[in-house]
Image (cartoon, helix red, strand yellow):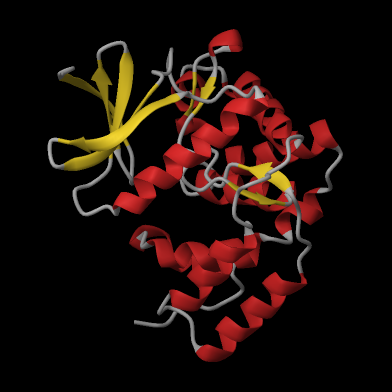
Amino acid sequence: MVEIGRRLGAGKEAEVYEYGGLALKLYPSQASKAAVFREAANLALLERLALPTPRVHAAGEYGCRWGLVMDRAAGPSFAERMMAGHRLPCLEEMARLHRDLHERPGSGLPSLKAPLSANIRRTNLLDAASRDRLLSQLDALPDGDRLCHGDLHPWNIHGDGEDVMILDWLDACAGPPAADVCRSYLLIRPVDPATATDYVDTYSRLTGLPVADIMAWLPSIAAARLAEGVPAETESLLRLAGLTPAAG
């Protein structure tokens, strides 16, 4: 039995520990078993696409928590590299990686629109009229069949050059690249609005996808994020969704 080593990092959804020469991603004790196996299945599907993703080795219970054993990422995160003065090169590299994902089919993965619609429906921060309007806007946006990460930001890309690795594939889905890039914008924006804008511009310049097509997804994606329970972002998300935060 391999012993769990030192903690390598932590995010909103899980913690990552050394596990011999591999990494062990442990979800909170209350996390569903289904979520662990969903990410394992996503990573298994991605193995055939020749992308810089970790190979999953096992899924199971580790110290009363569900987790995944996978390849360990090398090097610092892109966020750390950016803070060390490599902001523009990292944005360029992230955009290229994102483009490479979007060139692959999302076969076998759920539709990107499905979780957006479900989150808009289940948040209690929208009144009925606003919910119906946002759902109609989402329905009018184009579908797609490209591989989308669903949670790509500088904190879950590690390494450099040949050693780069993209992590956190729980939300992988099939959809239009514009929506996936808009989600990245929304995740980066609370930490660094200028970098979020620069990232959209960089991806647009690299791929030819118009910025307007990317930002057309913002109301739907902002409204859906309300259901994720990030109180510090609630007021901003309501505004980005085209709503006015309640007074008081």
**Could you say which quadrant of the image residue 98 lies in?**
top right
> Quick check: 54 above or below 243?
above
Quarter assignment of residue 152: top right
Which quadrant: the C terminus?
bottom left
Q: Residue furthest bottom?
A: 129
Q: Is residue 245 visible?
A: no
* Number of numbered labels in the structure image: 0
Give the quarter of the image for residue 226.
bottom left
In this view of the protein, which residue sits in the foreground, 240 or 72?
72
Q: Is residue 130 above or below residue 175?
A: below
Residue at 40% x, 61% y: name it: 228
Estimate the x, y position of residue 207 in percent, counting from the top left.
Answer: 82, 35
Percent position (x, y) of residue 184? 58, 45
Which residue is farthest right? 208
- State the image coordinates of residue 38 (x, y, percent, origin top left): 44, 46
Residue drawn at x 48%, y 24% as measured from the top left: 54
Front-most of residues 108 and 233 = 108
Q: Is residue 105 left or right of residue 111?
A: right
Q: Residue at x 53, y 78 (%)?
A: 244
User: As rendered, which of 110 and 183 lies closer to the eye?
Assistant: 110
In what quadrant of the picture does the N terminus appear? top left
Q: Position of residue 102 (x, y in %)?
A: 72, 38
Q: Is residue 150 visible?
A: yes
Q: Is residue 4 left or right of residue 92?
A: left
Q: Is residue 3 above or below residue 247?
A: above
